[in-house]
Amino acid sequence: MSALEGIRRRTLGNPFLVDGLLAIVGVALILPGFFRAGVSVWPAMLFSLFSAGPLTVRRSMPAAALAGTTVGYLLALLWMREPGPGIVCCLVALYSEAVAAPRTRALITGAIAGTMIQLFTSIVTGVHIFAPANLMLIAWLGAATAIGDATRNRRAYIQAIKDRALRAERTREVEASQRVAEERLRLARDLHDIVAHSITVINFQAGAAAHLLRREPDAAEAAIEHVITASGTTLAELGTMLTVLRQPGGEPPLSEPIPALDRLDDLLDGFRAAGLVVDVQRGGRTFSLSPAVSMAGYRIIQESLTNALKYATPRSATIRLSFAAHRLRITVVNPVTRTEDGRHSSWGTGRGLLGLRERAASVGGRLDIAEGREEFSVDAFLPAFPTKP
């Protein structure tokens, strides 16, 4: 069964072979008609080949196949003085032309071939052009063209559906790739915010502990406790992130607090303990923010203060929170000095600043960075609820 199926597929998959078999079948079908009309063997064979042979190229050259079958039919008509069975091959070729060619070309070609066949048949046989037999011939020619046109339309419709499905599949793949890229960026931002902040605090507290260990052991002990607290917080946040990554839904557990502006005081206490002087100024009437916007604001302040702790001279920063017209404006300013090459002391690798802009854009806000001679400022404008960036 499998061998027969393979032969069938190879046979039907070869258009030239299929059309060659069709031509042979055409010869076999119309040859007896010539014999019944009293045509001798060789003329009958010749007319049959002229009529059916062009069908071998009906797919690759449908117009040529139609022309060849029409000529074969007309030659047989002149020889026999009556319509021959070769008209069947003309109908097949006319159908093939209507399938392969655009509608306008198929109609013009079919009209020319049909007119020639009809006129020659009427002239040679002496039958009136509107006689029932000729009208039947016109009907067959029109039917072949109509069936071919319908087949072409059906194939075009099926191909359009396949193309649309392929485009939809490609769109889904692109969207999936975009989601993966966005998720990678989000994870990179979260890792940077968590690790950079905590490592900076730990670094400063460990340095202070080493410096105060002999002279002020109590202060050194307090610094070490801050190191322990910061490292524990970092491990907890990383654990939460890993838990989210392992969960199919990607949502944080309800028992884990989400970094948000309502935890801002705890964040500021950690920076102050690390030696950063932080001044907070609030303006306007506060209103509720969506969790995504609140977390974005928290991360923006966290990264800005981390930047200030690492590069500000002296180590201080001012935070201004302004609530107005369903929009939150966050401004973080810290003093800077310039190095010998003219660069700000607040300049790092730039990945943190890029993450700040991405944070703001992810909820439909924007973030501006200003670099003055004596201060460095981050100015974020966030909507109360996320919008498409």
Image (spheres, rainbow, N blue to C red):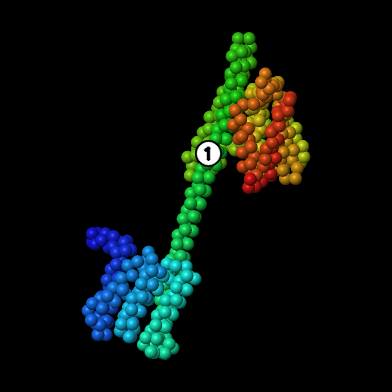
The residue drawn where x is 28% and y is 68% is 21
Element marked by disc 1? helix
Left or right: 219 in relation to 151: right
Q: Is residue 114 above or below residue 191?
A: below
Image point (30%, 84%), residue name? 80
Residue 92: image quadrant is bottom left
Residue drawn 63% across the image and 32% down it: 353
On screen, residue 252 above or below 231: below
In the rendering, at what x and y percent does residue 177 appear? Answer: 50, 45
Query: How many numbered tags mark residues here?
Result: 1
Look at mark 1 in the image and give the residue it sits on: 184
The quadrant in which the N terminus is found is: bottom left
Which residue occupies the foreground of this view, 185 or 214? 185
Task: In this rendered view, identify the residue nearer to me: 207 or 151.
Answer: 151
Residue 241 in view of the camera: yes
Q: Give coordinates of residue 65: x percent, y percent.
A: 37, 70
Asked if residue 80 is positioned above or below residue 48 in the image, the reply reads below
User: Whole-percent x and y of residue 159?
Assistant: 45, 62
Quarter of the image with the C terminus is top right
Identify which residue, 270 or 108, lies in the foreground: 108
Dot 1, crowdedness within 10 Å: few (<14), some or many (≥20)?
Answer: few
Residue type at numbered disc 1: Arg
Q: Nearer the viewer, residue 8 or 329?
A: 8
Q: Can you name the residue that lies furthest to the right here?
A: 284
Identify the residue shown where x is 40% and y is 73%: 94
View extreme (top): residue: 215
Direction from residue 326 to residue 180 in the image, left or right? left
Q: Is residue 262 visible?
A: no
Q: Quadrant of residue 88?
A: bottom left
Q: Position of residue 281 (x, y in %)?
A: 75, 32
